[in-house]
Amino acid sequence: MYSKCPGQDMRKLRVELYKCPTCGAEVEIFSDETRVKCQKCGTMVFKEKMPSCIEWCASARQCLGEERWKALVGDVKTEQIETKKIEGEKANGS
């Protein structure tokens, strides 16, 4: 296990583009952020879903330890299945 989370290494940050819900401007949100203020209108823009580090960090397995990682991966997979199920129902009009 690591003494410091390797996912917080500034060299490994990723950026995603989101649209401001108020003005439609593109807003950059980095992987270590959960929200940012739109530079155009000042609205707080949030990520749609708060990801767990086990979803995006390549070092999560080593960082958490095998047993804890396996337990958490099971929780994430269950959540992903439920999310896909809900999205499918919405697409089908259910």
Image (tube, helix red, strand yellow):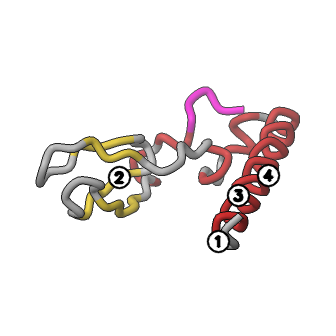
Q: CA distance from mark 2 to mark 1?
A: 27 Å
| Residue extent of the magenta highlight | 1-5
Identified at 71% across, 67% down, the residue is 88
Q: Position of residue 24 (x, y in %)?
A: 24, 63
Mark sitting on residue 86: 3
Q: Is residue 28 left or right of residue 81?
A: left
- The reply to whether the C-beta atoms of the residues labelled 3 and 1 are less than 8 Å apart is no
Give the residue at x 46% y 54%: 12
Q: Which secondary structure, mark 1?
A: helix
Q: Circle 4 is placed at which residue position? A: 77
Residue 6 point in image, percent of width and height: 56, 41
> Reading the chain from its start, which is encountered first: label 4 or label 2?
2
Q: Quadrant of the C terminus?
A: bottom right
Q: Which of the pair 84/76 is nearer the observer? A: 84
Give the mark, 2 or 1, whose residue is nearer the N terminus: 2
Residue, disc 2: 29
